[in-house]
Image (cartoon, rainbow, N blue to C red):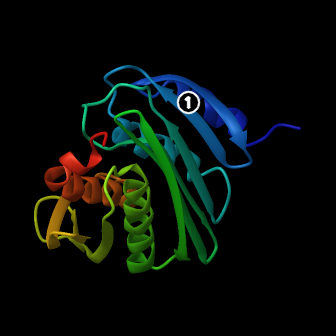
Amino acid sequence: MSSPLDAVVPLAGAVPGVASATAEAPHAVRVRLLPGADGAEVALAVGRLLAGTAAGAERHVLTVPQQHRPGRARIDRLDLHTDGASFSVGIALSCAGRSATASARSGTTGAGTRRAVADATLQAVTGLLAHPVHLEVDHVERSDAGAAPVVLVQVSLVSGEGVQRLAGSAVVQDGEGDAVVRATLDAVNRRVEALLAPA
């Protein structure tokens, strides 16, 4: 008996920037990117394909090649899953030879899902750090006032040197979750690159 993913996998494999695509679960597709491909753009495109595979359920998994700017945290895998009133996010990040994973859950309200994605991203970043600090999400907001929607994430970094307030932003293209991850990393990468370096 054929699965809804039987039709989606070839389409995901044809998305620009995708090297290969394979079915992984009832509503999950794992894609590997070509070098230089934009992981955020691919994740959004694959997510749109998966949105129609089952009523009330959407999931996409992203795997990217091991090439990135040294000293910056980057996304290795992003797993967003909605099922009825439940939302979950799993993320894997890497930097300077380290890797870390984290997850979070929430209801499917807009504010709840944005907060969960930002929290999971910061948990993973904390797992990469060579120095003891505490990262906490202060605020996550979506603004539709401009030409394109934008997500703004405000973060507190607490260390032995005190409290730093950080902020990052990212344009929402077709998916909020991916924009929240990029906005959170924008805030962290901008100020704590030294903390992400090897000890």
Q: Please name the amino acid that badge 1 sits on.
A: Leu
- The quarter of the image holding the N terminus is top right
Q: Is residue 111 above or below residue 12?
A: below
Percent across and percent down for residue 141 are: 25, 74
Q: Residue at x 24, y 31 (%)?
A: 69
Question: Secondary structure under badge 1?
Answer: helix
Q: In which quarter of the view is residue 175 placed?
A: bottom left
Q: Residue furthest left?
A: 146
Q: Residue at x 33, y 49 (%)?
A: 130
- Residue 58 located left or right of residue 93: right
Q: Is residue 48 visible?
A: no
Percent across and percent down for residue 125 are: 37, 55
- Residue 191 located left or right of residue 36: left
Q: How many marks?
A: 1
Q: Residues within 10 Å of mark 1 (few under 14, many from 20)?
A: few
Q: Is residue 163 above or below residue 199?
A: below
Comparing 190 with 161, the one in front is 161
- Residue 182 located left or right of residue 82: left
Q: In which quarter of the view is residue 15 placed?
A: top left
Q: Is residue 37 above or below residue 74?
A: above
Q: Residue at x 27, y 53 (%)?
A: 185
Q: Is residue 24 visible?
A: yes
Residue holding disc 1: 11
Q: Residue furthest right?
A: 1
Percent across and percent down for residue 86 are: 61, 74
Comparing 98 with 46, the one in front is 98
Q: Residue at x 38, y 79 (%)?
A: 111
Percent across and percent down for residue 199 are: 30, 43
